[in-house]
Each structure stands twice: as structure tokens, then as C-alpha cells.
Amino acid sequence: MHRLSGKRGGDGLIEMSPTDSFNDDVNGYPQNTTDNMGFQHDKQESSSSPQVLVDTCESLSGSLASLASSDHSDSPQRENPALDRISTLTGLSRKRALFLKFRSRIDKQHQSKDSIFFRDGVRRIDFVLSYEEDKDDGRKPERRNIFEANLRNIGLELETEDKSESEDGNTYFVKIHAPWEVLATYADVLKIKAPFKANDIPENKEMPMGWLATPIRLPEDIMHPEPDYFTAPFDKNKSDFFLIDDKDTFFPPSTRNRIVYYILSRTPYFHDCERDKIGIKRLLNNGTYTGAFPLHDCRYWKSSSSSNCENDRYKLYKYWAKFLCFFKEQPIHLIRKYYGEKIGLYFAWLGFYTEMLLFAAIVGTLCFVYGLLTYEENEWSKEICNETIGGNIVMCPLCDKKCGYWKLSKICNSSWQSHLFDNFGTVFFAIFMGIWVTLFLEFWKRRQARLEYEWDLVDFEEEQQKVQLRPEYETKCSERKLNLITQEVEPYLPLTSKCVRTCLSGATVLFWITLIIACIVGVIAYRLAVYAAFASIMKDSPTNQLHVVGPYITPQLATSVTASCINFVIIMVLNLMYERVAIWITDMEIPKTHLEYENKLTVKMFLFQFVNYYSSCFYVAFFKGKFVGYPGNNAYFFGSWTNLRNEECDPGGCLIELTTQLVIVMTGKQVWGNIQEALVPWLMNWWGSRKARCHPESLYSRWEQDHDLQPFGQLLLFDEYLEMVIQFGFITLFVASFPLAPLLALFNNIIEIRVDAWKLTTQFRRPVASKAHCIGAWEEILNGMAVLSVVTNAFIVAFTSDMIPRLVYMYAYQPDGEMNMKGYINNSLSVFNITEFPEESRPEDGENPSWFNSSITTCRYRDYRYPSGHEKQYSHTMQFWHILAAKLAFIIIMEHVVFTVKFVVARLISDVPSEVRARVKRERYLVQEYLHNYEVEKLKMQLQKSDDDCTCPPMIYPTIPNHEMMSDRL
């Protein structure tokens, strides 16, 4: 094969001569039959086509010339009268005419439209482009003509379906096939691994008590759809080294569409050599094409009876996408085979995360059950609900003027509810989750290492991706410099431009984070403003008239629930706005590689989402009720001029409010996400699926079915990762306040896996396969959140929960010296003289309840301060400082214990299993040995040939050792 390369900064396209790309021996079918456009061509004539370079102006001019002599079925202007008549029909008449027309074609060509092959039934459709005529823009046909001509020059084969063949009568479809020569060339360029020997290492599949897992097992051919081979990077010049039984099926469809998309994204489409006129992405953005996608394998709802259509899509739908399979394991290897390694890794990670959630959910449920079982032992709640204790304690107003005095027994129900989550089990669960997150991350590294080996990703380093520059980077960077490593001239972004773009991007991110904080401040102001209104409305307990829920509704609960709902709405709105902004500023930075682009976008989105979702929870956990002052000297939000007093925690504690906030935001996000992911796509594609089922024979073609599906955008997988990482933060950062969070996450993920599987299999076009050897930047983010979770849970137990004050009281301040909580409520409340209320904060007339009279001279508030008349009145007591010291000591001890255990566990658990390490070494050894034997055998054959052809006197050749040939093919 004669080939030339035009480099664009070290990453150009390879052009093949027609004699190479259309050779009989290469493609496996006669070339003097119907060509890629459905017309008869003479082989010799096609071989004389001009050879052109894709990356030069001359090549583009030649492309136009070659297009003129090519088949005219690509041209929308060449339509026969019969097609014109069909296009004028509508409704049932059009469908009947299409059916009769296509039935006659099937009689002649014996090929159904519901096929993944060209009309000849031999060449597989690797990619499909779709477009509609735009008579108002004459540049679009010109771009298409040049683009498709350049694709043919590269060696791809095209076949066009006229718009009259489509269901809507407006859409043209260009089917693309990559012959062996193109696939082999670019497999060599991309260093795609190919098998050269069957794996001879016995695999230990026996597992103790393995029979228990029988109900969740899938058939062996579904779990392991491909044999296990040793592999090596493909080398076109050594193709006989690899196990090539059939060139048509040697590269799987996922690899084929990956190669074709690589070509599409780097092919120019304009003749004036404008650097930014390159790639299918720009053609999609400017409307030249309406779609570009690889085809799914036949239909998903029934197995194909055709022998030449291996329907992995049907297998995925049957064993993975159906919700009734929720208890089954995922066919990870089949997912990887069909969708590629990147999507396969996501579902492998999501499945492993869900498996590990099962253990956290069990322990969290046991802690919640412990709270239920000790419900009656809650001494402090009994005192609050006791009419002789809590019923006689008058509490100070919780807001200025509009709030009156109230009795402690009013919060009886909330104190009982708080005990369900604020008990000794909370401390144990917080420590357990700190260890659980370490085990999760360490065991995932082992699972990921095993998948890296099984999916041929061990030697897939990020440097390989750095060779593949983003087309956008190549076109937007006008500067060129010499790469000192490769000694090739490549594009680069000047340092000044990079600094300006980075600063502008950072300023934009900072602005949006500030906007989120401003919205949170607004929600806090809402909480402060409406609390007084709720307190005034509920002062005579009108909610008690409501059955069941009435007694549980308090001003604190009403304020917390409504504020949480408003905050959730703000979160969702800001998410929709910021995602577009993040993509825009990332594009503006012009990242060099796809990996760099993903990492930059990941950091931006995560920072925003972290502040957006967790800021309200951080406020309730660590700020609410901590800076309130005391009656008569209250602290105000932004100063006293605002008349907005800082919120106080009720005597039941702030933990129940944190639980409420966490449940609303976390559950609301999960419910909204599942509705958005499942219901909306189903409604949008319901009609398209109905059409396909109504026309099972031929009227609704395979490419039309996929064209009607939703495009699989590059950010869909990114959004899925982001959603799960945010959920991971909820169940780790604040889990001490809500032990049932892992259980809710477990239920959500079980649904999430099947919803995502159903969407991918039925509702989305087949995504272009892409490689990845790990989950990328998300792994570092998870590690960071794991460390932060230990700190946040320690602070929640110490400062948000009442656990430490209760323990200090029981061990040091219990008046009878007994190990119980009797008298705790009275001890935890300080006394204030109501005559010392300033006029601007004294309750107005009519705001006080009917039982209040002039005989009441003091009120109680939650703090540890000296009473009025004491020499240190309203200063903190010694008990306050003892409790503070105990809180800090608990934080230090808990953090050191958990971090020590995390360190020991991480050291004991190896990141790579010993079995995998042995297999990797074995494969590397075999690659070297087999390549050596291959070169020796090749040299022997060359020497033998030269010896037979030589007429000169015999000479002594050096002795070549006779190595044992270990491969049957060698």
C-alpha cells in the first residue's frame, strides 16, 4: 500500500490510494460489482483516480474533481420522477407507496432496510450521517460534497439513502463503511490492542459459598462474551502475528466506530484551507449535518433471526436493562464490548459502589433501629413532655416583638423525633462510615486493576491520549513550535493567552460560587423573616386541629421545611444555568487534549455543585444556633438595623433540622433526577418506538430508528458521575445526622443502574466508543471527600448533636452522682429576668399566650450562663468550658482513630491483586518472546529466499538459533 501523511501538528490523517482501499484481497468482495454508491464501476477506472493529500489545498481541489466523477446518487439534485411522485404523497398513501417500492427492491437485492449492512449485504455500516436540504443556504451542500469527497480519499466507503426513502421524506442518510485497510492503518496509529495468543493461565473461579450467589448470576456467555487472549498493540506490518481469522469481524463494532469517528473529527470540509473548517463537530454545530452516530445492533426488543447480525443490544436489554433484573449482576464485559471501556468503567464503578452501599445501609438501619428500641429510655424527652417539669418551664421568645413566651412541653414531639438520630449509635455509625469509605476506595482500586488487565488497559497511559490533540485545539491555536521530544512542529497556546483565559475562567467560577452564597444568604434571611410570622400564627396552636400531623407542626419545622424546599428549587435552577457556563468557559480555555478538557470541566462543575448542594447543610450543621447571644443582647443578621435575629436551635437540638434539610435536598434530587432521566426520554421517544414496532419489516429503516433516538452527548456520562459523587457526599459528609441516608442511596442506585441501562439501550443513539483506564479525576475527588467526611462527622457529633453535653452532665454534673440523665433539661437551660428585655425586643401586647401573667418574672433559654444578679451574670459558666473542651477532645480523638485505621487499612490492602500482577508479567513476557520468535522466523524466510535467488558462489551465513515456535500460526 502506498500512503502519504499530512501532519497537522503531529496528528494528521492518513490518505490511501484507491488501489489500496478497494483491493479485492483486502475487502473480501469483488470490486467490479455494485460499488459503495450502488452503481457499476470498472476496477481499472477506479484505480486511476487521483491521489490527494487531505491536509493541503490541492487535496481539497482534487476532492471536488473526484466528486464530479463519482456516483451521483449522493447528489440531492438527481432524483427520478418516481421518487418525486412519492415525495408528494402523505399519510397512508405515502406509506403504501414506500412499502411497494421497497418490497420491489428487496425482491431484487434480498436486503432488508432493518439491517446494519450496505445494500450489498456484505459491508457493515460503521457510521451514519444525516442531513436535510436547506435551499436557503447554498454553502451546506458544498461543505457536504467536499467533506464526503475527502472521506473517500482517505479510504472510507459511502452509500447514500435518498430522502424519498425516509419516513419523513426530508432526511438523507449517508452510510459509512471502513474497509480493512483503513481499520488496520488507524488501529496501528491508535495503538489498539489485538489478540495474538489464547490466555493459558488457569483462572480460579471457585469461590467459598459460591452457590449462595447463584440467584444473581447471569449465563456464562453473557458475563464473558469473548474468549480471553493475550494482546499486544496492533502493528499493520505484522498483521500475520495476530490471530486474524476473519478481517470483517477482527475489530469489534465499538472499535470500528471509534476509528471512524477519529477520522470524521479530523477531516477538513473547505477548499480555502481555513484551519477551523475541520471535523464533524463543526458540521453538526453549523447545521450541515443533523446527526452523526454509529448504529445499534438491530432491534432491542427481539433477537435477530439474521445470521449476519449479532444482536448484543438484545442481550443487554434482556439481561441488563429490564428492571426485573435489578437483583442480577451486571454484564460488565458485554457492556464494555458494546459501548467501550469508558462507559463500561462507569457501570462497573456504579455497581461496585451500590454493592458496598449494602453494608453501610445495613449498619445505618441497625443504628436507626437502636434509636427506636431505646425510645422509651429517653429521659430528657420524658422531662420535656412531663407537665410538671416541661409544662412549668417558661421559655424566652425566639424572635423580637412578634414572638411570645412559650412552654418547653411544646417541643415534646420534636424531642422524641430527635432521639431517633441523636443517640449513642450516631457516634458508632460516624466512626464506621469513616472506615467504610476507606474500604470502598481501596477495594475499588483492586476491582479497577482487574478490569484494566481484562480490558487491555494496563499499558494505556495518559501519554497516549496526549498524542491525540483535540481538533479544536489544533484549529484555534495559530502558533507553532518544535516539540523537543518528538522533534515535530505542533500547535501551542502562548503563555500570555493561556494566563488570560485561565484568569477569566477562574473569575467566572468565583462569580457563580459567590452567586450561590448570595442565594443561601437570601434563604437564611427568609428563614429569619418568616419564623416570626409562623410563630405569631401558631401561638394558640391552630395546627392541632389537623388530624395526625397537626401536633407535629411547629414554627421551627414549618420554617425549616419551606426553606429547604425553596433552597432545593434554587439549586435546580442554578444547576441548569451553570452547566452551560462551565462548558463555555472550559471551551474558552482551549484544553490541549480530551483528558485535560474533562479534568478542567470536572473541577469546575464539582466546585460549583459542592457549594450549591452542601452549603445549606453546612449552615444548619455548623452555624445555626452557634452565634445567637442571649435574651436582651441578641446577635443580629448583618447588624441590628435588619431586625433579623440569628436563628436559634430549639431545646431539642439542631440535629433534627439538619436531618430535615438533608432528607429534602438528597431525596428531592434523586426523585427529580430519576423523573428527568426516565420519564422525559420515554415520552420523547415513545412515538418513535411505536413507529418502529408498527413497521417491523422494512418501512422504518435501521438508520431511521437510531436517528429518531436522542443523541448521546459527551456530557451525559459526566453528569452521571457528578450525580453519584454528589450523592456520595451526602452519605459521607453528613451521615451522622441521618443513618438512613445509605439506605435511600442504595434504593436510588438500584433504580439508577436499570434506568441508565434502559436509556442507553433503548432511548439513546449508540455512543462512540472511547477508552479510559480509570474513572479519572473523580477518584481524587472521592479521596478528598473521604478525608473531609471524617472531619465533618466529628464536628457534627461534637457541635450539632447534644451527645457531648449529655455525657459531660452524666459523668460530672449529675447532682445525685448517678449514671443517668435525670435533671438534664433543667441543667441545660439558663435563666433570664424578663424585666431586663429592651423595649425593641420585648413581645408586643397580644402576642403572649393566654396563660402568661404578671407573676412570671423569668424565662429560660438554651445556654450555660450565670443568672441575673450573679457577679458574672450572663457570662458563660465553667460547665460551658468543660463541654467545649470535651467537644474538642472528642474531635481530636475521633479523627486520629479513624485516620489511623484508614492508613492501616490502605497499607494492608494492595491496590493490584497478586493474581493480576502475575498475569500482567506473563503477558509482557509472552509479547517479547513471541515478537522475538516472529522476527527470527521472518529473517529466516528472507535468508532462505535470498539463498534460492542467489547465483553467486555460496557463502557462509551466520547461524541463527532455532527457536521453538509457540504459536500455531507461526
Image: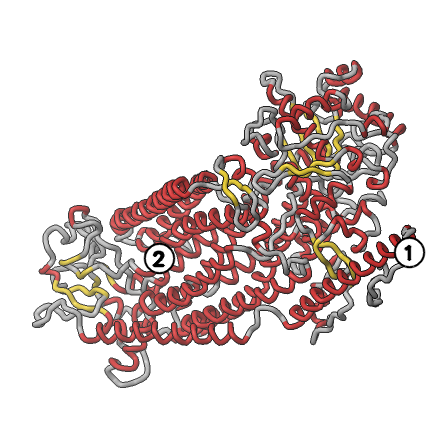
**CB-based contact (under 8 Å), mark 1 and mark 2:** no
Residue receiving disc 2: 618
Q: Position of residue 669 (x, y in %)?
A: 48, 50
Image-based side of 369 in relation to 681, left or right: left
Residue extending furthest toward the bottom:
817
Q: Earlier in the sequence, mark 1 or mark 2?
A: 2
Task: Tell me where residue 734 appears, x and y as whole percent.
Answer: 41, 62
Decide: is 592 above or below 838: above
Q: Would you say 481 lies left or right of 464 here?
A: left
Does 698 appear above or below 373?
above
Q: CA–CA distance between discs 1 and 2? A: 91 Å
Amino acid type, mark 1: Pro
What is the crowding at mark 1: few (fewer than 14 residues within 10 Å), some, or many (at least 20)? Answer: few
The residue sitting at 87% across, 60% down in the picture is 955
Q: Is residue 459 above or below residue 265?
A: below
Residue 876 left/right relative to 26 = left
Extreme-front residue of the structure: 953
In the shown orientation, is residue 655 left or right of residue 871? right
Packing grade of label 2 (10 A; few <14, some 14-19, many >=20) is some
Q: Which mark is residue 107?
A: none
Taking depth in this image into account, of 315 and 133 the one nearest to the observer is 133
**Residue closer to the observer: 889 or 33:** 33
* Residue picked out by circle 1: 953
Q: Secondary structure at mark 1?
A: loop
Residue 121 coordinates in the image, percent (x, y):
84, 36
Front position among marks 1 and 2 = 1
* Along the viewing direction, whichever of 244 and 38 lies nearer the viewer: 244
What residue is drawn where x is 44% and y is 64%? 735
Note whether residue 851 is visible. no
Residue 805 is situated, as x and y percent measured from the top left of the image, at 29, 73
Quadrant where the N terminus is found in the figure: top right
